[in-house]
Amino acid sequence: MLETEQKSQLMDDGTMPMKVEGGRILLIDQRKLPGIFEYFDATDLDAMCFAITDMVVRGAPSIGVAAALGMAYHLSKLASAGNINIDVVKNTKDKLDATRPTAVNLKWATEKVLDYAEVLLKRSETGKKFGEQLFSYAESMLQDHLDRNRKLSEFGSAIFPQDGKVLTHCNAGSLAACGWGTALGVIRSAKLNGLCPSVFVDETRPRNQGSKLTMWELNQDKIPCTLISDSMSAFFMGRKEIDLVITGADRISANGDSANKIGTYGVAVLANYHKIPFYIAAPLSTIDPNIESGAQIPIEFRDTDELKTIDGKSITIEGAVALNPAFDVTPAALIKGIITEEGVLYPPFSTSIKEALERDKSTSRR
Amino acid sequence: MLETEQKSQLMDDGTMPMKVEGGRILLIDQRKLPGIFEYFDATDLDAMCFAITDMVVRGAPSIGVAAALGMAYHLSKLASAGNINIDVVKNTKDKLDATRPTAVNLKWATEKVLDYAEVLLKRSETGKKFGEQLFSYAESMLQDHLDRNRKLSEFGSAIFPQDGKVLTHCNAGSLAACGWGTALGVIRSAKLNGLCPSVFVDETRPRNQGSKLTMWELNQDKIPCTLISDSMSAFFMGRKEIDLVITGADRISANGDSANKIGTYGVAVLANYHKIPFYIAAPLSTIDPNIESGAQIPIEFRDTDELKTIDGKSITIEGAVALNPAFDVTPAALIKGIITEEGVLYPPFSTSIKEALERDKSTSRR
C-alpha cells in the first residue's frame, strides 16, 4: 500500500515498548511513565517473567513479543552451552506462560517460538546457529506486529467518522501493541487520514493506564484528548459527546466474546444503552479459536494493593478487604465490529472470525 | 416505634459529621478521613463557605444542616450588634447557596432558616434573643435529620433481601446525612433487623468517598464490605454477585430523576441491564418539587486537579486536559424505588413524590 507508506512518513510508529541493543532485551518501564522514561533490562528469563507479572511491559501484543524474545534469548544461551532439547524449550515456554493468564497473545507468541525451535531441532541446528536463528525469528515478530497494526488501523480508519469523538479504555497504543497501536492505532490512522479525531480517555483504575499511558501517547501525537474518570463515561455518553468507543482486547474467543482490561464490559453496556457503536481493535493473534466463548477465558485477579494504595500510600482503611479482577469479558452481542488486519469483522463473529483466520493463514508467509 | 428504639441501642447513630461546642460550629474534616480524625472550625461565615466548597463537609443533607448552622450563627452575631434585617438574612443565604450548585438540601435548609428569621423579625425579635432562637432552630435540624434517616432506613430495611449483597456508590452514610445515613442507613437498619447485609463499595473517583468514607463507616459498624474500583461494578453484576444497588441523592426532581455523585447514572444503567433493582435512599428534603425533570438540575464541574493529582502528586501528563463533572442525573425510568421517611416511593414518581410531600407537610409540626 503505497498510500499508507507515504502517510506513515507524517507520523512515526509511536514509542516502541522494547528494543534489542547490545544483545540485551530492554523494555520501557511502563510502570514509571509518564514521569520517568527508563528501560528495564529483561534479558534474563527471571527478569522477563518479573517484568511481565509486574507490568513493566503490558498490553497483550507487547507481552507476547517480549515473552518470545525472552524465550529465544534463554534458549539461545542454553544452546550455546550445548543444553538444548525439546523438553527444555517446553519448560521455558511453560514458565513464561504462567506469568499472566488472560491475554492469549503470550501463549500464541511462545507457541510460535516453540514451533520454530522444533523446526530447528529437527534440522539438527544446535549451538550458536540455533540461538541466532531463533532470536532473529522472535525479533521479526516485532516488525510483523507493527505491520499488522498499521494494516488494521487503516481498516479502522475507514469506518471512523469525520471529527469523531471516541472514548477509549486502558491503553491499546504503541506501548501495548509493539508499535503504532490497535485502538490508538485506529485513532492515529484516522488523524493521518484527515478525520480529526478527538479522544475521551478514561483513567482506567486501578493501574491508571489511561491517565498515565494513553494521555502520554496521544499528547505525543498531538491528538486532542480529555481525561475523565471511569465513572464519567455514562455522563458524557448521555450528553451525546461520544460518537464511538474503541478498545483493544486481550483474548477473543471463537464466538467474538472479548476479554479486555477491567471496565471494558461496563463501557460496552453503557455504549449499547446509548446506541453508540462499540468496537474492538486487535490483531488476529488475540483470537483464541480453541475456546468457544468468553466463559472459558481465565480472569486474572491481581494484588489488591493496586486498588488500596497509590505510590505505596493507603487510600482506604487499614485492613480493607478488596477484590481486583484485572479483566472482564464483553459478550459478542455488545460488539459492533472487531477491527483486524484482515478487515473489520462483523457478526456473526463465529463465521467472520473463522474466515479471517483462514485468509490470514493462506496469505501469511511467516 | 418502640421496636426501633430498642434496636437502636444495638448500634449508635454513626459518626455525626458536625457538632456545636462552646458556641463553635465544628465539622469533621472529611477530606482527611480515614487517616486523620479532626474537627474543622467553620463557625465564621467565610470558613463555612470554604468548608462546603472544599468538601470539608459533604453529602447533601450534611451540607444543608451545616449551612443552616453557619447562617444562623452569622445572623445571630449581626443581631447582637443590632444589624439585623431581612436583606441581611437574604444576602447571607445567597452567599451560602452559591457554594455548591447541585444539592438542593443546601437551599432547602437555608430557606428554612430564612423563613424562621422572617417569623422572628415579624415578631420584632432582635438582639440576643433573635440569635438564640434562630440558632436553636438550626440546631434542631440535626436531630430532625437523624430521626428521618432512621425512619427511611426502616422502610428501606423492609425491602432489603435476607443476606443481600448490595452495591453502593459514594458515601451516603452518617457523615453525609447528619447521622445514621440514607443508603448506608438502610444497610445499618438491615443489619439491625438481622438481614445480614454485605456491601460492595466502589471507590468513587475522583474524590474516593467510597474507599475513604464508606469503607470507614461500614468497618465501624462491622458490616462486611469489599472495596472495588468503579470500573468493576459490571463485572460483579455479570457474575450475579450483586443483588441490589442503593445510593443517596443530591437533588430529586418532581418526576423522580435523581442527581447524585458522578458515576451513579452509569451504575443505574448497568444495574438495569443486569435486572438488578436500583434504589435511591434520601430524605424528602432532597426533593426539589419546583423542577419538573433532571434536565433542569445544574451540574457542578469541579477543579480538574481532583482527577489529575492524588495528594498533590500528578498521576497524568503535565498540562493534561480533563473534565470533572461532580454529579450526574439518573432518569426516573432506571429507578425501582425512592426510599424516604414517608415510605418507599414507586413509579409513577410524579404522583408518589407529590403524595409523600403532602403527607409530610400535613404531619410535620416543625
Image (tube, coloured by chain):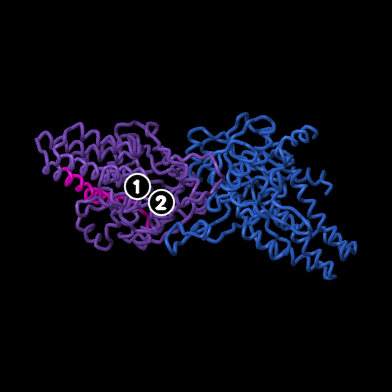
Chain colours: A blue, B purple
Vertical position of residue A171 compared to residue A191: above or below: below
Q: Position of residue A229 (x, y in %)?
A: 50, 45
Q: Is residue B112 visible?
A: yes
In this view of the protein, which residue sits in the foreground, B50 or B145? B50
Disc 2 and disc 1 in contact, CB within 8 angstroms: yes
Q: Quadrant of the C terminus of chain B?
A: top left
Q: Quadrant of the N terminus of chain B?
A: bottom left
**Magenta span of residues:** B134-162
> Which of B282 and A42 lies nearest the eye of the viewer?
A42
Cα separation between marks 2 and 1: 10 Å
SS at circle 2: helix
Q: Position of residue A223 (x, y in %)?
A: 62, 36
Q: Which residue is mark 1?
A: B58
Same subunit: marks 2 and 1: yes
Residue pictured at 74% horizontal, 36% vertical: A8
The three-letter code of the residue at mark 2 reads Gln
Residue depicted at 34% across the width and 47% down the height: B58
State the SS at label 1.
Answer: loop
Which image quadrant for residue B335?
top left
Tell me where residue A281 appears, x and y as whole percent.
66, 42
Q: Is residue B303 magenta?
A: no
Question: Which subunit holds the residue at mark 2?
Answer: B
> Is B161 on the left-hand or right-hand side of B83?
right
* Residue matched to label 2: B209
Left or right of B181 on screen, residue A10: right
Residue B109 image-quadrant placement: top left
Viewer-nearest residue: B51 or B355:
B51
Q: Which mark is residue A351?
A: none
Q: Between disc 2 and disc 1, whose residue precedes?
A: 1
Give the residue drawn at x 56%, y 60%. A302
Secondary structure mostly taken by the magenta-highlighted segment of the chain: helix
- Crowd tier of the residue under label 2, counting other residues whose Cα lies within 10 Å: few below 14, some 14–19, many 20 or above: many
